[in-house]
Image (spheres, helix red, strand yellow):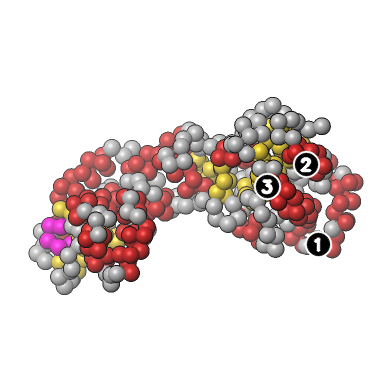
Amino acid sequence: MTTFAPPPTQLNPLHAVRHATQQVGHHFLQLRFDHPALNTTLSLNGPDVIGVRSPFVPHWNTTLTHHGVHPVALIEAQEASRSLTQALDHLVAHHAITRTQLQQLAEQRFIQAMLPLAWQHAKATLIPSPTPTATPHTRVLPALYEISQLAQAITPAARALRPEHTFLTDPAHVVPTADDHPHTLVYRAALRGLSLQDMAARLPLRWDQLTEIIMTLLQQQYLSFTDQDHPPVVQPQLQAGETAPDFILPDRHGGQLRLHNLRGQRVWLTFNRHSTCVLCQARQTELAALAPLLAQQDIQLVSVWSGSVSALQDGLRQAPLPYPVLADPTEATYARYGLSQSIKGVLNLRHLSALTQHVQHLKTTTLQDERFRMPAEFLISRTGEIEHAHYAQYGADWFPTHQVLHWARQPTEGLA
């Protein structure tokens, strides 16, 4: 085992790799940082990199999927092989990818691993190893030159981003790009709560591309750092004839829903209070019974709740609701749709009376979660226009069901 520099002296990782390639034979190069999230191991065979273990580099399956290799071909290669080398050989033999393309992907993986480390310092340890099996290889020196060039273009602000950084999204301030656009991919990754490191390992973006997009979205206020606390400003209540504001929110099953993607369908959009609100839960039971009838009229129910996905899963775990159930932890969409806090609504005698009707279902957590936010419901046309908006005056002040059913039966007309 060879340590290039004794502690506390540390090397720039690119210099350490360049030095290691001067050694003959196969070695593992371990790069250890004060920040453990950066720790990286390279498999070197003389002047070539033949393997990478990095927190910023995905599994080979993910790399191949991003490149366009069909999932069925990947499964067949795995089933027919006992090692990564055999699986890659199988893909080449069955014309799923060429050897040249594999080498290009291997180079991209090396660059992705080293680019976030280019301005760091590490303790480098070289460990001899038996001769490895043949795998796609990367010539180190040309790749290091490209990494240096890419690193120089990364701004100081982008360099200051840390792998563990997560970001807040404003779900009511949706990035106006196509679903497969890099800005949208990053925005949705942030919406799911992925850290910068997780994004690097899952998205088909180099570190410089990823951090540049992050900085752009921060500057345009589509993202903010999680340590910032800026409550959303409540907008004026929406009126019939206005376009329903777009949003993207996570659902309780791990997916996401964007309102804009429902264009072409009519939508009954409901904003509830919180997942332990017995009044809201009773309303959902009613809506679940109506869902088949509404589906016949091509009407999509969408239910939004205040709180995190985990709180929603816990509060509604007994409710098999047959429509999208979304979580809004920051209540940004509530504010964008003009839902306000109302002490009067909570103290309204009709609100208190409705609560007493469900007293047998009240729990301690229900009382602890009692909040002043009032519900609202919106009937939205196929073109995304609000046809009717109903803002509740108290917790159980729901849109009259018979009026909604009348609207459902008359696609081109408003409410009677």
- Pick the front one: 125 or 248: 248
| Pointer 3 residue | 295
Residue at the image point whose x is 33% and y is 69% from the top: 79
Residue 102 x, y percent position in the rendering? 23, 54
At label 2, the amino acid type is: Leu
Residue 360 x, y percent position in the rendering? 84, 63
Q: Residues within 10 Å of mark 2 (few under 14, many from 20)?
A: some
Residue stretch in magenta: 44-48
Disc 3 is placed on an element classified as: helix
Quick one: quadrant of the N terminus? bottom left
Q: Earlier in the sequence, mark 1 or mark 3?
A: 3
Disc 2 is placed on an element classified as: helix
Residue 244 quadrant: top right
From the image, state whether disc 1 or disc 3 is nearer to you. Answer: 3
Q: CA distance from mark 2 to mark 1?
A: 29 Å
Q: Earlier in the sequence, mark 2 or mark 1?
A: 1
**Residue 154 within the segment the image draws in magenta:** no
| Pointer 2 residue | 405
At label 3, the amino acid type is: Ala
The answer, for residue 362, to whether it is visible in the render is yes
Q: Earlier in the sequence, mark 3 or mark 2?
A: 3
**Residue extending furthest top?**
241
At label 1, the amino acid type is: His
| Pointer 1 residue | 361
Magenta: main secondary structure equals strand
The answer, for residue 392, to whether it is visible in the render is no
Disc 1 is placed on an element classified as: helix
